[in-house]
Image (tube, rainbow, N blue to C red):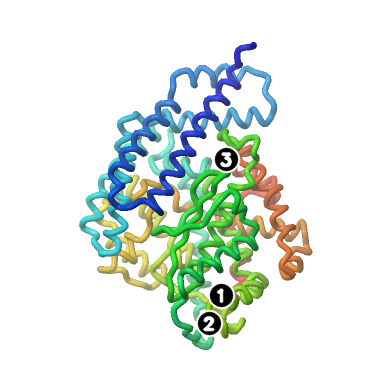
Amino acid sequence: MNKPNAYQQLSQHFQQLAKLSHLNAITSWDQATMMPDGGNQARAEALAELAVIIHEKSTQPQLEEWLEQAKSQNLTSVQQASLREMERSWRNSTALPADLVKAKSLATARCEHAWREQRKANNWQAFQVNLQAVMQLAIEEAQIRADISGLSRYDAMLDLYEPGMQMQRLDLVFGELQTWLPQLIQDVVDKQASWPKLSQYGNFLSEQQKQLGLAVMQKLQFDFNHGRLDVSAHPFCGGVPSDVRITTRYEEEDFTRSLMGIVHETGHARYEQNLPLDLVDLPVGQARSMGIHESQSLFFEMQLGRSQAFVEQLHPLIKQHLTQAKHMPLSELQQHYLSVKPGYIRVDADELTYPAHIMLRYQLERDLINQEIKVADIPELWDQKMQQYLGLSTKGDDKNGCMQDVHWPAGLIGYFPSYSLGAMYAAQFHAALVKAKPDTPDAVAKGDYSGVFAWLKQHIWSQASLYETDELVERATGESLNPAYFQQHLRSRYL
């Protein structure tokens, strides 16, 4: 029996790592959904130990030797892409010492768990203590990664979620957005000022909302044999491609928030469920970047889910499942999905004001990691930027301001820009799809999404990380990221 060559040894190693990551993903999902509060300390310690095991396995000395040896092998194009992603994963893993990995796992577990109650209590002072510990470790991590990569601290963190994207390019993208978005928001708000007030239909029971959500997931071809829907404090998509876990939270005064959250997370899930099975346990078989991942959830939620055709198809399902909505006219449902109103909560924001929430968070976390501001400054700066971008004040209301997101407590620094990048990619993908298949709008109007899903599978889902982000986008659309499609999409839909 021949001894495995370097590439084969690397493949076996990363497949073993994938199994450990599988356990980490499912136990983390349980921690956020099912676990009783009394289990948190023991779970946090167990996850911290698992993080150390994964880290140690990800940084074994022979990996560097295998990576160098594999570069001289005669590899196929897929194996070359796989080797590139293995090396990227290895460099990210070897950057941090084990004690920092463990400290980060403990600090984020403590901060995230406490955040759930502290947010409810609007207790910034208590939350600040835990967040300060997380941010200090994040700065430490960013400096280490910056020293290795030659990037700035924030760029080094951004590279973990959006490889190849840097502050300079982001500042240009968001700078362009700021030149037209505020006026567009105002124009649409003015246009909608004469709309009739929406009727009040009473409380929508959570169990009825769940059944509606499951029906919509089925319509969007979610594979229930390889996934499920649950409830958590903050909606997310977790698990692994063979067992995708999505969550939502139900608000009985407005069923559309949960429903669109489910549509959003289903977009994430369909991407995961359609990654190439023969590569799924290797880095190259994973999603390309968080921006591309968000493009899929936002394609489902915004390009598809809020389209007039989709809302028309939702209407009978809503009347079927929600007792309080049996007499809701279609015109009111359509108005609800097109309504633009600046608000406090990012996950509840409409399509038009959402990018303003992301610009705010990007600017704050960038300046935090670059040590231009401190954690203690966050509430005041958040309030200033909310007033600047959306005309709202969060002074004294931190639970609806700087405490509303799980990302910073979880140590996810550099993640937020991916949301708006995703919206831009989604608009660009949709434009390319319609250009390639001009009959797409007619098919969708008839409830036939097969052409949409086939295009996404061919150009995005099945491609996983075979290509760098810009090349993936260029191969799918003929050009790299072009925010003009996002502007065109918004103007067309709302004006």
Q: Nearer the viewer, mark 2 or mark 3?
A: 3
The residue nearer to you, when weighing 2 against 78, is 2
Q: Earlier in the sequence, mark 2 or mark 3?
A: 2
Q: Is residue 433 above or below residue 142?
A: below
Quadrant the C terminus occupies: bottom right
Marks 1 and 3 in Cβ contact (< 8 Å): no
Residue drawn at x 49%, y 20% is 64
Give the number of the disc on residue 192. 2
Q: Position of residue 229 (x, y in %)?
A: 51, 57
Task: Name the amino acid, label 2.
Answer: Gln
x and y percentages locating residue 194 in the rendered image: 52, 88
Q: Amino acid at mark 1?
A: Leu
Q: Secondary structure at mark 1?
A: helix
In x, y percent, where is residue 389? 41, 67
Question: Which is nearer the N-term, disc 1 or disc 3?
Answer: 3
Compare marks 1 and 2 and give the one earlier in the sequence.
2
Residue 2's image quarter? top right
- The crowd level at tag 2 (other Cα within 10 Å; few <14, some 14-19, many 20+) is some
Q: Dividing the picture into quarters, in which one does residue 10 lie?
A: top right
According to the picture, the residue beneath numbered tag 1 turns out to be: 338
Residue occupying image coordinates x 65% and y 63%? 219
Residues marked 1 and 2 touching at CB (< 8 Å): yes
Comparing marks 1 and 2, which lies closer to the viewer? 1
In this figure, what is the number of numbered marks? 3
Q: Position of residue 198 (x, y in %)?
A: 50, 84
